[in-house]
Amino acid sequence: QVQLVESGGGLVQSGGSVRLSCVVSGLVFNIYNMGWYRQGIENERELVARINSDGSTNYEDSVKGRFTISRDNEKSTVYLQMNSLKPEDTAVYYCNAARSVGHYGESNWGKGILVTVSS
């Protein structure tokens, strides 16, 4: 059974920092591309950051220079370090593990964790 369990969210003041963690079990972690997504009130779920199995990363424009995604394959964990937080970063953050091989695609989601940034 695949499980993705997020932790580290909560309430933080504007300008503050939070580190999210996502521990993954039930799959071969190091071959999966890992992502953090978020969904705010009245917003669609959007990709925040991704780190691929080869270590390459990409970020949504509004978080570039503020957020850093990393992974520890030994611990089957992906992190999202969020600095200089803004109220508009308030959202439920979801961890995702995905891979595709030819026509086969797989995507696994955590339940999400709330980050609230107060002004």
Image (cartoon, rainbow, N blue to C red):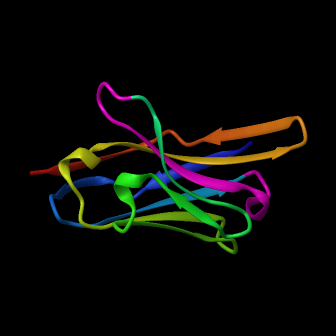
| Above or below 47: residue 71 | below
| Above or below 4: residue 40 | above
Q: Is residue 112 left or right of residue 40?
A: right
- Location of residue 83 by image quarter: bottom left
Question: Residue at coordinates 65% horizontally, 67% vertically from top-left?
Answer: 56
Q: Residue 103 appears at what percent x and percent y?
A: 89, 35
Q: Residue 3 appears at what percent x and percent y?
A: 64, 46
Q: How many marks?
A: 0
Q: Is residue 38 left or right of residue 32?
A: left
Taking the magenta stretch, the answer to whether it contains residue 15 is no
Question: Residue at coordinates 69% horizontally, 39% vertically from top-left?
Answer: 107
Taking the magenta stretch, the answer to whether it contains residue 29 is yes
- Location of residue 112 by image quarter: top left
In the foreground, 36 or 11: 36
Question: Residue at coordinates 74% horizontally, 56% vertically from top-left?
Answer: 32
Q: Residue 1 appears at what percent x and percent y?
A: 74, 42
Q: Which span is picked out in magenta?
A: 26-43
Question: Residue at coordinates 41% horizontally, 53% vertically from top-left?
Answer: 61
| Above or below 93: residue 13 | below
